[in-house]
Amino acid sequence: MNKMRIKKGDTVIVISGEDKGIKGTVLKAFPKTQRVIVEKVNMIKKHAKPSQQNPQGGIIRMEAPIHISNVMLYSEKINDVTKAVYKQGNDGKRIRVCAKTGDEL
C-alpha cells in the first residue's frame, strides 16, 4: 500500500467523478482505506434519529469519503494542481514539497 501524500488541511481539486472541478479542503484522511473527506464534495443524505446533538432528527446532508485517486493537490502559488513529493530537509528530516515549484507544503 502506498503512503498517502494528501493530508488533513490540504486544498485539493476533484479530478474525476460527479463533483469534477470542485475545490475544497480535506477535512479528514483515512490512510488504511486510501480515502479522504473533502468539504462540500460527495454530499449524501443521511436519516438521523433525534439525539442530544440533533434534537429535531430528520434528513442530514453530509460529506462522504472519496478515494484519493479522484483528487489532486492544489497549489495557490501556481494556481494549478501539483503532486507532493518528499525531500530531505536541512535538519535531516523529510519534508513535503510541491513537485512543480519546490516550495514547502
Image (spheres, rainbow, N blue to C red):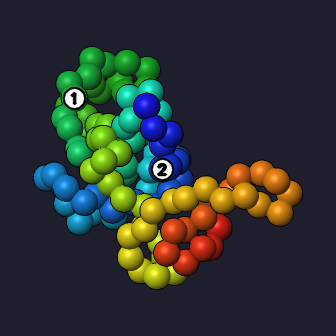
Is residue 63 visible in this depiction of the protein?
no
Choose top left, top right, bottom left or bottom right for residue 97. bottom right
Residue at the spot x=47%, y=33% of the render?
Answer: 31
Q: Is there any visible trace of residue 98 in the rendered image?
A: yes
| Quarter of the figure that contains the N terminus | top left
| Residue 49 image position (x, y, % from top left) | 27, 17
Spot the residue most to the bottom: 78
* Res 88 quadrant in image: bottom right
- What residue is shown with label 1? 46
Q: Residue furthest right?
A: 91
Q: Label 2 crowding class (10 Å Cα cut-off): few <14, some 14-19, many 20+?
A: many
**Which label number is shown at residue 66?**
none
Q: Which residue is mark 2?
A: 6
Amino acid at pointer 1: Lys
How many numbered marks does the figure carry? 2
Relative to residue 65, is residue 92 drawn left or right? right
Residue 5, compared with residue 90, is above or below; it is above
Mark closer to the observer (1, 2): 2
Instruction: Identify the residue shown where x is 23% and y is 45%.
Output: 42
* Labels 1 and 2 touching (C-beta < 8 A): no
